[in-house]
Amino acid sequence: MRVIDIASKRRLYFEMKQRELKCSILITLAGFVIATTILAFQIRFELSQLYHYIVAFFLLIYFSINLYLNDK
């Protein structure tokens, strides 16, 4: 937004506000990109950890059933 026919201080104020708006939009977009990257990394990391938990859970069930059947 440019203001014409007003004192130079007023014009500088509006130009500064316009620049501030652009910077805030860029900062918001950068934050969104960073948050998305962190979320994707976290989901990928938790899925790899989840794989270990699933394998450990099935091994525990297998050994429990094996011990139960051999006990009879």
Image: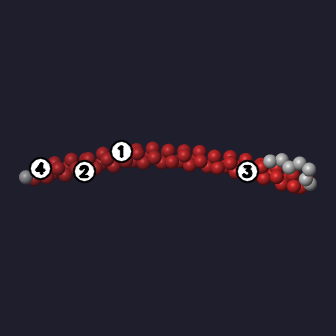
Q: Which residue is mark 2?
A: 60
Camera-side mark, 2 or 1: 1
Q: Which residue is mark 4?
A: 69
Q: Secondary structure at mark 2?
A: helix
Q: Nearer the viewer, residue 48 or 1?
A: 1
* Position of residue 71 in the picture relative to residue 62 (left or right): left
User: Where is residue 68 drawn, in percent x and y?
Assistant: 13, 52
Q: Residues within 10 Å of mark 3 (few under 14, many from 20)?
A: few
Question: Viewer-nearest of labels 1 and 3?
Answer: 3
Residue at image coords 20%, 49%? 63
Type of amino acid at the residue the image marks with label 4: Leu
First in sequence: mark 4 or mark 1?
1
Q: Secondary structure at mark 4?
A: helix
For the residues labelled 2 and 4, the Cα–Cα distance comes to 14 Å
| Relative image position of residue 45 (x, y in whole percent) | 45, 46
Of circles 3 and 2, the one toward us is 3
Amino acid type of disc 1? Tyr
Q: What distance separates the C-alpha of mark 3 from that of mark 2? A: 57 Å
User: Residue 21 bears which disc, if any?
Assistant: 3
Contact? badges 4 and 1 (CB < 8 Å): no
Please report whichever mark, 4 or 3, sits nearer to the chain's N-terminal start: 3
Left or right of 2 on screen, residue 25 = left
Residue 4, image x and y in percent? 89, 48
Of label 1 and label 3, which has the lower sequence position?
3
- The residue located at (83%, 47%) in the rendering is 2
